[in-house]
Amino acid sequence: MLFNSLHFLLFFPLVVGIYFVIPRKIRWCWLLAASYYYYMSWNAKYALLLAASTLITWLSGLLIVRCDGRPGGEKRKKWLVAVSFVSNLALLFVFKYFHFGLSILNRVLHVLHISPVQTTFSVLLPVGISFYILQALSYTMDVYRGAVKVEKNLFKYALFVSFFPQLVAGPIERSRDLLPQILVPHDFDFDRVRRGLWLMLWGYFQKLVIADRLAIFVNTVYGDPAVYLHGGVVNLTTMIFFAFQTYADFAGYSNLALGAAEVLGFRLTTNFVRPFFSVNITEFWTRWHVSLSRWFVNYLYIPLGGNRVSPLRKYINVMIVFLASGLWHGAAWTFLAWGGLNGLISIIERLLTPLWRKFRAVLKFDDRSALMKCVQSAYVIFMFGLVQVFFRSESIAQAVDFIKGMCRLNPYDLFNGKLFGFGLDLANFIILAAAFVVLFAVAWNQRDGSSLRTKIERQPLLLRWGLIIADIAAVVFFGVYGPGFDASQFIYFQF
């Protein structure tokens, strides 16, 4: 059930309406039932995986607590954490990485002149499995660390793992943040509901007006095997378009998730904090997909030693985290390359930081100047887009061909109408240009860290409603949907 489908537009109001009229004590039960229905709308059988991950991590939490104060308890707790992680990651491996692992094994066997392993095992990737398994595992670790009290009610804990607004694509919530919200009832609050609906409306604008329109151009270019022959202008435009498609698609989903949760009375983690206004790629990854970055820092980078080790070991830790992030995104060499390149750029930036500071001091650069901020944003967008070529490509070879094609730059292609031959005409480019202005204007107005919704609420009634009507009109008239278009799946649903 996609957020941009008619099914969800019927499902969500029904869930909200019933939620606020039934007795407060059983509202969480209704949300649990609605969350499992939501997940089962893709494939009912895969709800068993969700339930299995939930049961394993819930039992591990109970058993960990029971080891406190007992002889050998600390060792048993570590074993329980290991069992929880291994069993959950085994589920993830079977359904997401089995064929990738088998392909690696068969390559090794080929080198050794041994017959390859043949299998008829085939399954569909359960939607959102990477997200809810990480969220469930964070509970196990938090209980072990004493960061959260164990939840004895299995079904309330099950709601923490399966809460439908963020179930299939995050944000990946920490148990100490979301679980306490599940344990208290939420009453109807008109202002809160209104703010949540505003955020959802903005998410629809990002997804339907920007991301899905960019997807037409990007998919057309990448759908042609001869990506090398398109020329530098087309490939460079595609690279930039996919960078913004990824952002608008995932930030749009995150805003829909945050807004839907807020309507119900829950507060989720803000997943994007003006990432394209970062000063470099290292900072970019603290502002992009914040909940995933935080998970890897808390449960992988810090256990590896974090910053408390030698510089060389620290850089190795950084690379391990980025490679793990790449593999988490997908079972393919392209994703490993994507993670490795991001790690390499981050390490190079850290190594060059002292030199850059001296250079800046000599030339008296002002990082706060408008010019420097534009240069930094351009650098971040270009580097992110360049690495995203590997994220989008079907193979390493296609990514390399795409980048080679970018080097065949012919500026005349900007004016000869060639860009209009990939699914978008002049009118669509004008719509995109206007949408980009809105996108950056919204981000710019959040530069002081305040909520744009709070600023809008301070405006006169006529202006507030004008903005709301304009957003609705943009989604209705300029959104990409209807005859000729399927409801476009969110990019991160495949992870």
Image (cartoon, rainbow, N blue to C red):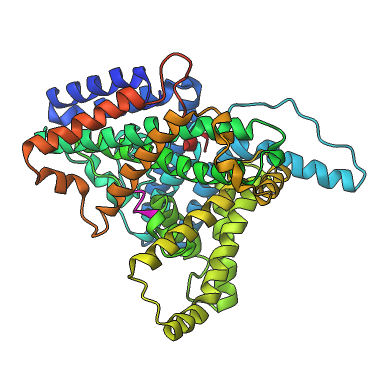
Nearer to the camera, 454 or 459: 459
Q: Is residue 109 magenta?
A: no
| Rendering quarter of residue 468 | top left
| Rendering quarter of residue 461 | top left
Left or right: where 242 falls relative to 98: left
Nearer to the camera, 262 or 248: 248
State the residue lying farthest toward the right. 113
Residue 334: where, in percent of width, then height?
65, 46
Q: Is residue 271 magenta?
A: yes
The secondary structure that dominates the magenta segment is loop
Residue 385: where, in percent of width, then height?
53, 50
Q: Can you see residue 67?
A: no
| Rendering quarter of residue 478 | top left
Q: Residue at x 52, y 72 (%)?
A: 350
Nearer to the camera, 194 or 163: 194
- Quadrant position of the N terminus in the picture: top left
Left or right: where 101 falls relative to 424: right
Q: Residue at x 90, y 42 (%)?
A: 114
In the rendered view, would you say 75 is above or below 164?
below
Q: Which residues are magenta?
A: 269-275
Residue 36: where, in percent of width, then height?
37, 26
State the residue lying farthest toward the left. 460
Q: Residue at x 57, y 64 (%)?
A: 345
Number of numbered markers: 0
Left or right: where 295 falls relative to 201: right
Residue 139: where, in percent of width, then height?
38, 49
Q: Residue at x 58, y 29 (%)?
A: 421
Nearer to the camera, 289 or 386: 386
